[in-house]
Amino acid sequence: GRVNIDKAEFPEYARRLVEFCSLCKERNVSYMNREGYAPGWFANSHLYTISKTNPWFNTPEVTKLIADPLQALSGRLPDAQKETPQGIVMLAKGFAGGQVSPDCGWMRENAVHAVILRRPSSSFGMVQGMLTLRKTPEHEVKMILKGIQDEKKDDTARLEILVNGKSIYQGKTGFLKDSWTQQTFLIPAGLLTEGENTITIRNITADTEKDGLCGVGFDEARNYYWGWFMLEEVLFADLL
């Protein structure tokens, strides 16, 4: 998906996406016509919004994409950061990637927009967001994640955090399995800068199953109901 693409790879990525859309249109590939599938796939994997038209490849947005892919895909990552007395909060809806849960009521009374990060082989193992700052912080910054993890056992899930491409943490999530909690990670001084900063969170939990000769072809090939964690928000403390 687009969340994994850097600037140098972007033109080729756009060309390949257009090739996929064009071939589906030419050959009337309709498996993505089931309600909500195509719009969800474009939104979650490619940060691109299309309308609910059947067939999906006849939507005005897909027509625009095929005609001028670089222009159509030039939009930014979602902007869902807000300033609070505690610092800058990035909500889950501001991250691209992962498995979106727009009305998550897991282990809580009030439903929220959350994102699930499953093990890397699932294709739902990473999210990325853009933190925009008015000035460069001169000090170490606390990055506080609010989340919950695999309900089957504690400490099964592992995560990695990258700030502007540099890894600042790899290890246990620290989240509980039966309640939403906050975990604090430290961003060293000098990593965050004025303007846009890329924040990447990855699930790095190892699989236990062994691949066959053809690798993992279908969701059924692995059990992705363990080793996951969910995020509600990320707070960057004392940045105002």
Image (tube, grey):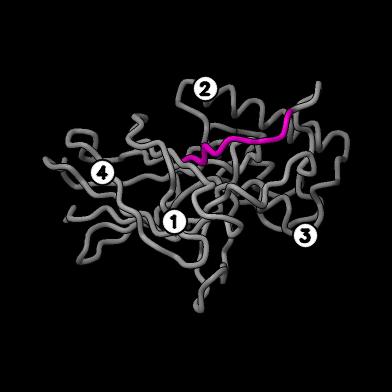
Q: Is residue 151 magenta?
A: no
Type of residue at label 4?
Leu
The region drawn magenta spans: 202-210
The residue where tag 3 is placed is 35
Most foreground residue, 145 or 227: 227
**Disc 4 vs disc 1: Cβ atoms closer than 8 Å?**
no
**Disc 4 vs disc 3: Cβ atoms closer than 8 Å?**
no
Most foreground residue, 178 or 23: 178
Residue 239 point in image, percent of width and height: 18, 52
Per the model, the C-alpha gap separating discs 2 and 3 is 31 Å
Q: Is residue 139 left or right of residue 103?
A: left
Per the model, the C-alpha gap separating discs 2 and 1 is 35 Å
Type of residue at label 1?
Phe
Per the model, the C-alpha gap separating discs 4 and 3 is 42 Å
The residue where tag 1 is placed is 175
Q: Which quadrant does the N terminus fall into?
A: top right
Residue 213 point in image, percent of width and height: 81, 21
Please identify, in this view, whether the residue under mark 4 or under mark 3 is nearer the observer. 4
Name the residue located 41 percent from the left edge and 45 percent from the top edge.
129
Which SS class for mark 4? strand
Disc 3 crowd rating (10 Å Cα; few below 14, some 14-19, many 20+) is: few
Tell me, for residue 9, which label it has, or none. 2
The residue lying furthest to the right in this view is 27
Most foreground residue, 144 or 172: 172
